[in-house]
């Protein structure tokens, strides 16, 4: 059995490892190189991807998206004097939108404090504020 490659139009034959069903439905290219020329790198990224979820993307997906757009966080936007080993991307509004202006870089300590204040967590029966996180009272 033989076919012509869709990319280079070269004639190629069915191998013994391919089933007849696979040969008739899946096999369209003579080599891996020819099949990869159809799908160029970055061609199906972002909204072009079949698995794109848009606004219904989850927490981890959004953090991966911001990392791919803005790179690794490398300083604290709240306090430039903070010297830490780890910095993270923090969502400003809490709505987790796909907007680059809605994200800021924070050290781990400031990120946790920011989230606690924004979400109104209670600590020892008191509402957490900026002052209570700084003084520890």
Image (tube, rainbow, N blue to C red):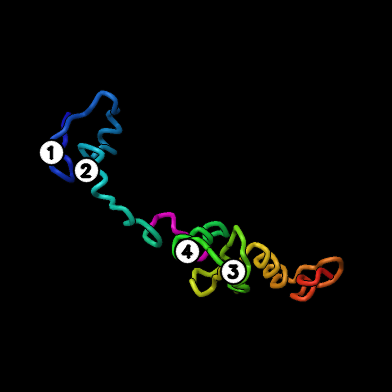
Q: Which residue is mark 3?
A: 76
Residues under labels 1 and 3: Cα distance? Answer: 57 Å
In the rendered view, tell whether residue 97 sits above or below residue 53: below
Q: Which residues are magenta?
A: 49-56
Q: Residue at x 21, y 43 (%)?
A: 34
The extreme top residue here reads: 16
Of the image marks 3 and 4, the number of the one nearer the N terminus = 4
Whether pointer 2 and pointer 1 mark residues with C-beta atoms closer than 8 Å, the reply is yes
The earlier-in-sequence mark between 1 and 3 is 1
Magenta stretch holds residue 132: no
Q: Nearer the viewer, residue 23 or 10?
A: 10
Q: Nearer the viewer, mark 3 or mark 4?
A: 3
Q: Nearer the viewer, residue 79 or 105?
A: 79
Q: Residue at x 72, y 72 (%)?
A: 117
> SS class of the residue under badge 2?
helix
Question: Separation of disc 2 and disc 1 at Cα?
Answer: 10 Å
- Residue lying at 47% horizontally and 64% vertically, measured from the top left: 54
């Amino acid at each position: 059995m033989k076919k012509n490659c869709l990319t280079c139009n070269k004639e190629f034959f069915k191998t013994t490892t391919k089933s007849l069903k696979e040969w008739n439905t899946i096999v369209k290219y003579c080599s891996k190189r020819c099949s990869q020329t159809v799908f160029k790198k970055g061609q199906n990224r972002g909204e072009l991807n079949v698995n794109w979820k848009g606004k219904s993307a989850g927490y981890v997906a959004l953090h991966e998206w911001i990392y791919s757009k803005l790179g690794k966080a490398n300083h604290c936007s709240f306090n430039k004097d903070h010297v830490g080993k780890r910095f993270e991307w923090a969502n400003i509004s809490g709505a987790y939108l796909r907007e680059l202006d809605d994200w800021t870089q924070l050290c781990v300590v400031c990120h946790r404090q920011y989230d606690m204040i924004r979400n109104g967590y209670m600590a020892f029966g008191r509402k957490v504020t900026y002052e209570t996180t700084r003084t520890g009272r």
